[in-house]
Structures are given as C-alpha cells and as structure tokens.
Amino acid sequence: MRKKVDADVSFCDFKPANAKKHKPNVCAFYKHQQDLRWKGVRDEPYKQKGDDWSKIMRRVLIGAHGETTKFHVRYFEISQGGNSSFEKHRHEHVVICIRGRGVLLFGKKKRPMEYLDTAYISPDTPHQLTNPYQEPFGFLCIVNAKRDRPKLLK
Amino acid sequence: MRKKVDADVSFCDFKPANAKKHKPNVCAFYKHQQDLRWKGVRDEPYKQKGDDWSKIMRRVLIGAHGETTKFHVRYFEISQGGNSSFEKHRHEHVVICIRGRGVLLFGKKKRPMEYLDTAYISPDTPHQLTNPYQEPFGFLCIVNAKRDRPKLLK
C-alpha cells in the first residue's frame, strides 16, 4: 500500500490519463535537504525490536512508495558507538558509504569504510557495520526487493 | 564471465573451502580513490555507438563481477554540455546525484538535480539527463539486472 508522503514531493505527470495522482509506481523526486534527509522520506527504526543492535536508524528512499523495482534503496545511519546486527542471510547487500566513516566486518575481514567506499556482501556472509568514530556513519544499502529473513549471529 | 580486476581489490574470504579465489559472487570491496574512481572499476563508454548522446561515460560498480543481485549499480558522469540518450523503456531507473549538478527530464517535468537528490523513473517514462554546467555531473543509476532494451525518442 502506498505510504503517505508530503504534498510537495514531486511526482512526474507522465502516466496514463486515467491514473490517479500519487498512484503507486509513478515517478518521484526526493529532494535532498541537509544532513542526509530527503523531502518525503521519513525516519524509521532500524528494526522493530532486538538488543543486538544500537544507535542506528533507517530512511527508505526507494521501496516504500509502491515502486516495482527488483531492489530497494535504504539509507542507514549509525551514531557514535552504535552497530548493526551481526547477521547473515541469503540475499546480498551493496553498501556505499556517504557520510562519515565506520567499520565493515564481512566474512573474516574487517575494513574501515570511508566516503564512497563500496562493498558487495555475497550470500550467507556474516557481516556487521559499526561506528567507533565521533561523527555519524551513513551509508546506502541496496538489497533485492524479495529477500529472506536474517539469521542473528553471536 | 568474470571481468579481470586489479589484484589488490579486496575480496572477503568467507566462502566454501572448495571455492577458487575470485570466483564469481564472492564479497568485494571497491575502495573509492578520488574524483569518483574506484579501485577495480574501469571506465567504459556510455553505449557502444549512437549519436543521440555525448560526453558521458560509465563505471559499473555492481553487476560486472559475477554478482547475483537482482540489480546493478552504475556510476555515470556527464561532462559540460553532454547528455544521455532521450529514451524510454519498461525497466525503472533510480538516479542519485553524487557529483556536481545537472538536469533531469522525466515525463513532462524538467528538474535540476543536485547533491544526493534522488529520482525514481517509473516504467515507460521518457527521460534524459543533461549537464549544462561547467563541473562534471555524476550520478549513481541503479537498475534491475534483467531489463529491456531502451527505445530512443526524439
């Protein structure tokens, strides 16, 4: 179902004459404001519950407004001292750092991530993102639209 | 087929014991260098031929190294005065500006694109990206891995 969006988010008007305004799967333009916030994109919790993660939130850029893409594009931000879940799953991640810096654990490797560093995390690879630094660590995470549930690891 | 990559591109080592090094679909880390260049990612022409576009090139971040994602992630850069094809197709585009600024024509709308502005171009929407400015206009373009051939428009 289509999520409510701000009225001044721009949707293109090239669609069938009988289509209703803001019908799912029309064009959209999410204007970047500042501090990695986009008009029409809301803050959401990283996950609904769990104590295996901390100080991390999400903004769903593509995937929450009725798009038919085979992928979703999300922005995640980890505050100082925070971390994502240590987990694995069958679906892949593409992670692109766009704010600050952090650390990516994937497989047996641990690598610092800086601006525009890009990681491909293949199926069933244990992974975790952490932010040991003072500035927020923000990254795009692109995933298949259809995906399996993560398995938490310890 | 797996493309050749620089030897010091980092691939994670969490894979089956019988997997060969650099086997398709292992993890990868593409270190950002400068000016929107990544270690292990080569410059490619925008298209193989055509006179409907100019001064635009591509770098394929995800999709050229055997990844099994349902999507590909490409970086395109348009120099001053250049443009992509004016076209439409069934598959969608997600465009995220990460360098300079440009102009997006989609449907009947024309919008300036600046840093981190994000557009979703829905199926069969005519679209074109141009750079009337002096600085390079660079953007991520994320598409389904399986997609139809574009139809050129005039």
Image (cartoon, coloured by chain):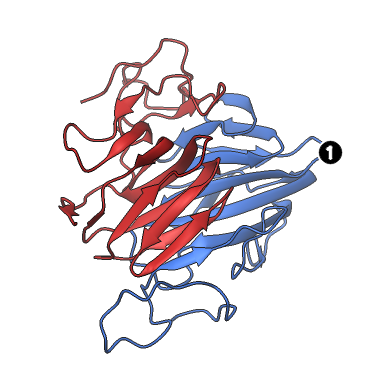
Chain colours: A blue, B red
Q: Let me know if residue A93 appears in the view.
A: no
Q: Is B144 or B140 nearer to us in this picture?
A: B140
Q: Secondary structure at mark 1?
A: loop
Dividing the picture into quadrants, the one containing residue A19 is bottom left
Q: Is B131 or A133 nearer to us in this picture?
A: B131
Please tell me which residue is depicted at 47% across the width and 19% down the height of the picture: B39
Q: Amino acid at mark 1?
A: Gln
Please tell me which residue is depicted at 38% across the width and 59% down the height of the picture: B105
Please tell me which residue is depicted at 67% across the width and 59% down the height of the picture: A33
Q: Is residue A36 above or below residue B29?
A: below
- Dot 1, how many residues are within 10 Å of its Cα: few (below 14), some (14-19), or many (20+)? few
With A87 as the anchor, is B48 left or right in this view? left
Q: Is residue B119 above or below residue B46?
A: below
Circle 1 is placed at which residue position? A134
Please tell me which residue is depicted at 33% across the width and 53% down the height of the picture: B128
Q: Position of residue A62 (x, y in %)?
A: 47, 61
Q: Position of residue B64 (x, y in %)?
A: 30, 31
Q: Is A65 or B20 nearer to us in this picture?
A: A65
With A53 as the anchor, is B86 left or right in this view? left
Q: Is A122 or B113 nearer to us in this picture?
A: B113
Determine the chain carrying the residue at label 1.
A
Q: Is residue A149 above or below residue B138?
A: below
Q: Considering the image in quadrants, where does the C terminus of chain A appear?
A: top right
Q: Position of residue A140 (x, y in %)?
A: 55, 47
Q: How many marks?
A: 1
Dividing the picture into quadrants, the one containing residue A5 is bottom right
With B22 as the anchor, is A153 left or right in this view? right
Q: Is residue A96 above or below residue A55?
A: above
The furthest residue to the top: B7
Q: Considering the image in quadrants, where does the N terminus of chain A appear?
A: bottom left
Q: Let me know if residue A11 appears in the view.
A: yes
Q: Position of residue A57 (x, y in %)?
A: 68, 57
